[in-house]
Image (cartoon, helix red, strand yellow):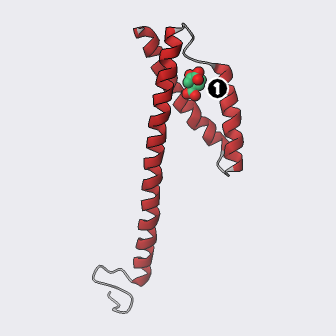
Amino acid sequence: MTTSHTSDANGAGPADEAVRAELSRLRDSIDNIDAAVVHMLAERFKCTQQVGHLKANHHLPPADPDREARQIARLRELAESAKLDPAFAEKLLNFIIAEVIRHHETIAKSA
Ligand SMILES: C=C(O[C@@H]1C=C(C(=O)O)C=C[C@H]1O)C(=O)O
């Protein structure tokens, strides 16, 4: 059934059009944020690769659990004040650090 005062050729009315515009606006911002996250992670990995070479050259272990504990405590506090779930922040940091340690182990093996 078509009702000309609420629907266009696709069956979408003015409200649907506004919803689509809002969704599109939000998704544009999400895309920008995702791009920023990728760029920030790329910069972080550039730094951690350098740390990996420094450690390998000086026979230091790939992982530093004390440093990680301090980072996690700090990130959980930052997350809380930003109203982000601290458990999620911790999981994300642990995921990133695990990848870094894997890189450091590879660097150490090839040194
Ligand atoms: C980068 C380092 O190496 C490892 C990776 C860390 C990280 O990604 O933040 C932290 C501690 C280490 O387990 C470091 O020691 O600083």
**Measured from the top left, where is residue 10 in percent x and y?**
29, 79
Left or right: 55, with 87 as reference point: left
Query: What is the residue that sits farthest to the bottom in this orientation?
Result: 5
Residue 38, quarter of picture = top left
Q: Secondary structure at mark 1?
A: helix
**Measured from the top left, where is residue 108 in percent x and y?**
46, 11
Q: Closest to the observer: 17 or 97?
A: 97
- Up/down of 28 relative to 81, above or below: below
Q: Is mark 1 within 8 Å of ligand 1?
A: yes
Residue drawn 57% across the image and 12% down it: 61
Q: Closest to the observer: 88 or 77?
A: 77
Q: Closest to the observer: 66 or 58?
A: 58
**Measured from the top left, where is residue 24 in percent x and y?**
41, 66
- Up/down of 45 relative to 16, above or below: above
**Measured from the top left, where is residue 65 in percent x and y?**
65, 20
Circle 1 sits on which residue? 68
The amino acid type, in three-letter code, at marker 1 is Glu
Residue 19, quarter of picture = bottom left
- Image quarter for ligand 1: top right
Residue drawn 44% across the image and 81% down it: 15
Query: What is the residue that sits farthest to the left in this orientation?
Result: 9
Residue drawn 44% across the image and 15% down it: 107
* Total numbered circles: 1
Residue drawn 66% across the image and 23% down it: 67
Locate the N terminus and report the quarter of the image it occupies.
bottom left
Locate the C terminus and report the quarter of the image it occupies.
top left
